[in-house]
């Protein structure tokens, strides 16, 4: 076997300690100090709007929550919501002693308030039960550091420890085989559902690779609908709640949703407003029933797998499987009689805090990249969706270098309907070289160029959806500040998204800017990250990079991409 159970436990324990270390240092700090530093803020609940966004009144300060930042919303007992009552209490002690309830959430927007000393902050992702506590008066809520996924890792440790679980043995105790990956190509006109249910009906596990824009969510919805029609119990599990909601919104599931046959763990107010018929799984308990669909993130479904003694679901569909650690994939085998893994090993692997050098020194690479390990070492029936509905022919040809040049465009958009000289009207990448200071993560000349081109695009079509991406959080924060200032201190439009690349996998957008600062270039040019960053756009991806990129040892696939895009000197 490639790994012993001790190897898995050592990795998971190392990652657990890495998660705890940074978080512990933060939460043991005095809560008032965190507030002064912008790590904690206090909001007075105003209302929940029609979109399910909870609006809070927050005092203006130098440190404001940035748009799309993640938080833990905490409801404290009594008068403890008022920061002047905190004294010397640390954030952890404040929560330990006075927390009544909490919810994960994120900041959707910030806007001006009639009272110039305050602003309004829109918060998404609050659970229904949490919001119920806020509906009585102007309740004070404290927002602090987002909790790390400690329980998820503890669940996986418990699963790995139990060597008597038969369903996990085939995955965890595998023998390294080398590269077995040879998927059949599935074009847009092939009925994937029939292929899975008829041709592969005897298979325990089926692996599907879904390159960018190939309609994996649409096809997954078709498959799920067919299974529900056949009275199968189905679990769809994914890393993010967003992925689960995107699946639920597909037309094929509309009738099952309307009939109350679709339920989700940790249902939030905004999710319920968007999908009124979506049911809440009470207490986040496993509720497998024939003809019903359950939706749960890895964090919750891993807990089910660690506790259950019998296989509850007929089918488990793991979306975002390339974001799953190998023990999480093993856990899914305990949850369903049949397993469908849908992912893309050419896109981002799971985010871990364990140092890359430590992972390499202990040879934990295959534990982290679980989906890739499955593809290379297991003789499961496998398919690759080979037609992209997102990109133009030119865009697909460039992105195709990551997929053995087997990606084809079937997009209805083959021409960029804009009259802007900076864009390539055939779609795909636009390469923009700039002088950037070495070590500068915030090149102001690149900021100006991106902003000015953004304005040009919006002048032609105000509703155009634009993403501005970078590898580095610092760069993203400064870009967000830059755009806010250019919008006179207001939140920039909702159709502009500024974020790190690891936060946007699955995003489809009209135009995408990929900013590569002149620092730590190897991270920005890492093939999986580069592929994700450059494959989001329907029309153009504008890659803004330093002239020093020529001096880098560029990975072969990235080099081929740039060459195809027109950078002949690379």
Image (spheres, rainbow, N blue to C red):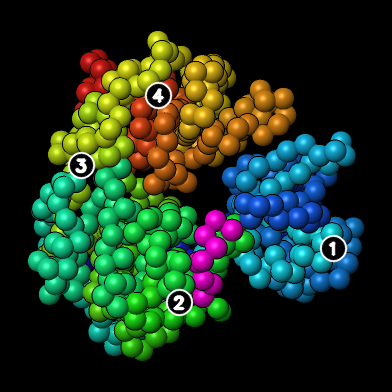
Is label 2 in contact with label 4 (beta carbons under 8 Å)?
no
Task: Decide which of tag 2 and tag 3 comes sooner along the chain.
Answer: 2
Query: In this rendering, would 266 be left or right of 112?
Result: left
Q: Residues within 10 Å of mark 2 (few under 14, many from 20)?
A: many
Against 149, residue 556 (above or below) is: above
Identify the residue under disc 4: 542
> Where are the magenta residues, as a range?
273-281
Residue that badge 3 annotates: 387
Q: Nearer the viewer, mark 1 or mark 2?
A: 1
Query: In the image, what residue occupies the spot 62% across and 65% down?
Result: 127
Q: CB of mark 3 within 8 Å of CB of mark 4?
A: no
Instruction: Give residue 472's mark.
Output: none
Looking at the picture, how far across and down is residue 4, in whole percent?
A: 27, 74
Asked if residue 127 lies left or right of residue 515, the reply is: right
Indicate whether residue 83 is drawn in magenta: no
- The residue singled out by tag 2 in the image is 303
Q: Dot 1 corresponds to which residue? A: 137
Q: Earlier in the sequence, mark 1 or mark 4?
A: 1
Q: How many marks?
A: 4
Q: Nearer the viewer, residue 257 or 322?
A: 257
The part of the image, by quadrant, that contains residue 552 is top left
The reply, left or right, for residue 201 in relation to residue 348 is: left
Helix, strand or loop at mark 2:
helix
* Residue neighbourhood size for the residue with mark 4, other residues' Cα within 10 Å, grouped as few (<14), some (14–19), many (≥20): many
Q: Residues within 10 Å of mark 3 (few under 14, many from 20)?
A: many
Q: Earlier in the sequence, mark 1 or mark 2?
A: 1
The residues bearing labels 3 and 4 have C-alpha atoms spaced at a distance of 23 Å
């Amino acid at each position: 076997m490639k790994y012993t159970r001790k190897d898995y436990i050592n990795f998971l324990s190392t990652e657990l300690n890495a998660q705890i270390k940074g978080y512990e240092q933060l939460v043991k700090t005095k809560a008032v100090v965190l507030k002064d530093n912008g790590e904690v803020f206090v909001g007075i609940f105003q209302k929940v709007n029609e979109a399910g966004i909870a609006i809070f009144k927050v005092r203006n300060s130098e440190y404001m929550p940035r748009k799309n930042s993640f938080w833990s919303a905490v409801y404290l007992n009594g008068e403890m919501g008022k920061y002047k009552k905190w004294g010397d209490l640390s954030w952890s002690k404040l929560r330990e002693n006075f927390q009544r309830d909490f919810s994960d959430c994120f900041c959707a927007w910030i806007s001006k308030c009639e009272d110039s000393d305050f602003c309004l902050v829109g918060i998404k992702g609050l659970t229904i039960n949490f919001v119920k506590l806020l509906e009585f008066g102007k309740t004070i809520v404290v927002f602090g550091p987002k909790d790390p996924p400690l329980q998820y890792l503890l669940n996986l440790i418990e699963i790995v420890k139990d060597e008597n679980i038969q369903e996990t043995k085939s995955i965890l105790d595998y023998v390294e085989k080398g590269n077995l990956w040879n998927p059949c190509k599935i074009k847009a006109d092939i009925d994937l559902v029939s292929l899975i249910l008829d041709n592969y009906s005897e298979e325990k596990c089926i692996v599907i690779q879904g390159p960018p824009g190939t309609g994996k969510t649409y096809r997954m919805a078709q498959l799920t609908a067919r299974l529900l029609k056949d009275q199968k119990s189905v679990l769809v599990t994914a890393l993010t709640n967003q992925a689960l909601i995107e699946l639920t919104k597909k037309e094929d599931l509309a009738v099952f949703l309307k009939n109350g046959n679709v339920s989700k763990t940790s249902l939030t107010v905004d999710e319920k407003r968007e999908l009124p018929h979506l049911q809440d799984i009470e207490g986040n308990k496993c509720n497998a029933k024939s003809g019903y669909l359950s939706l749960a993130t890895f964090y919750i479904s891993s807990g089910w797998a660690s506790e259950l003694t019998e296989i509850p679901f007929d089918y488990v569909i793991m979306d975002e499987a390339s974001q799953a650690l190998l023990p999480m994939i093993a856990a899914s085998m305990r949850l369903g009689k049949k397993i469908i893994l849908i992912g893309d090993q050419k896109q981002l692997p799971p985010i871990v805090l364990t140092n890359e050098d430590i992972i390499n020194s202990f040879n934990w690479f295959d534990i982290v990249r679980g989906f890739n390990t499955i593809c290379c070492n297991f003789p499961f029936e496998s398919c690759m969706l080979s037609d992209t509905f997102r990109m133009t022919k030119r865009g697909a040809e460039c992105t195709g270098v990551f997929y053995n040049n087997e990606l084809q465009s079937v997009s209805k958009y083959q021409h960029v309907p804009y009259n802007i000289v900076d864009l390539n009207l055939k779609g795909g990448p636009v390469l923009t070289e700039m002088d950037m200071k070495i070590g500068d993560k915030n090149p102001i000349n690149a900021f100006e160029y991106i902003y000015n081109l953004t304005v040009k695009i919006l002048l032609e079509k105000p509703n155009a959806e634009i993403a501005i991406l970078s590898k580095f959080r610092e760069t993203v924060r400064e870009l967000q500040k830059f755009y806010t200032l250019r919008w006179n201190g207001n939140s920039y439009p909702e159709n502009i998204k500024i974020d790190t690349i690891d936060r946007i996998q699955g995003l489809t957008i009209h135009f995408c800017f990929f900013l590569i600062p002149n620092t730590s270039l190897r991270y920005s040019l890492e093939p999986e990250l580069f592929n994700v960053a450059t494959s989001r756009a329907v029309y153009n991806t504008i890659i803004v990079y330093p002239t020093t990129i020529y001096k880098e040892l560029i990975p072969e696939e990235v080099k081929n991409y740039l060459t195809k895009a027109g950078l002949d000197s690379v």
